[in-house]
Image (tube, rainbow, N blue to C red):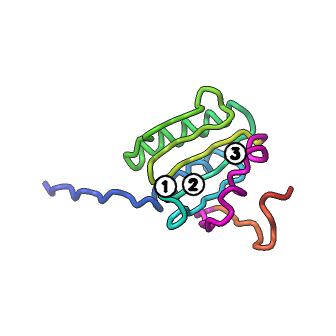
């Protein structure tokens, strides 16, 4: 019987991409991945998405929690807002996932707050044209 080869721990970029894919698979809206590397010491990536209702936001948060644990063995270090369903924050230390109700992103404007951070292409997600401002409807 062959010995199993231990898997290396996923990089923060791989964790961010996996979390983004989970959100896309569960029909999240407005999925944006920002790199905070070199801009902030608090985390490497912000993943921002929205859901269409409180139930959808809670479902997206739960899906990320469950599938990150199952697929890559990662558990969130800190979770906020899951029971309310308006704004869920999942802190994986190197990746912070924000899932907001569709009405919340306009109010809090996380993308505008971190506008100097590079947007990272998410596999399987069509990017808006370069001249399109994501903050203007």
Q: Quadrant of residue 69?
A: top left
Q: CA distance from mark 3 to mark 1?
A: 20 Å
Front label number (3 vs 1):
1
User: Split into 4 quadrants, where in the image is the C terminus?
Assistant: bottom right
**Residue 33: x %, y % from top left:** 60, 59
In the rendered image, residue 119 lying in the magenta stretch gets the answer yes
User: Split into 4 quadrants, where in the image is the N terminus?
Assistant: bottom left
In the rendered image, residue 88 lying in the magenta stretch gets the answer no
Residue that appears at 45% across and 54% down: 94
Find disc 1 in the rendering and name its residue.
43
Residue reaching furthest to the bottom: 130
Query: Start and end of the magenta stretch?
Result: 103-124
Find disc 2 in the rendering and name its residue.
46
Find disc 3 in the rendering and name its residue.
50
Name the element at disc 1.
loop
**Residue 89: x %, y % from top left:** 57, 40
Observer-nearest of 97 and 129: 97
């Amino acid at each position: 019987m062959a010995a199993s080869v231990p898997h290396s721990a996923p990089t923060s970029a791989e964790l961010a991409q996996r979390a983004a894919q989970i959100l896309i698979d569960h029909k999240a809206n407005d999925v944006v991945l920002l790199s905070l590397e070199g801009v902030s010491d608090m985390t490497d990536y912000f993943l921002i998405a929205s859901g269409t209702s409180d139930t959808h936001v809670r479902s997206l948060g739960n899906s990320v929690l469950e599938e990150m644990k199952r697929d890559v063995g990662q558990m969130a270090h800190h979770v906020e807002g899951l029971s309310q369903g308006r704004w869920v924050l999942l802190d994986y230390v190197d990746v912070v996932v924000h899932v907001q109700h569709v009405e919340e992103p306009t109010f809090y404007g996380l993308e505008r707050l971190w506008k100097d951070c590079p947007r990272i292409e998410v596999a399987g997600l069509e990017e808006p044209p370069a001249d399109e401002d994501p903050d203007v409807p």
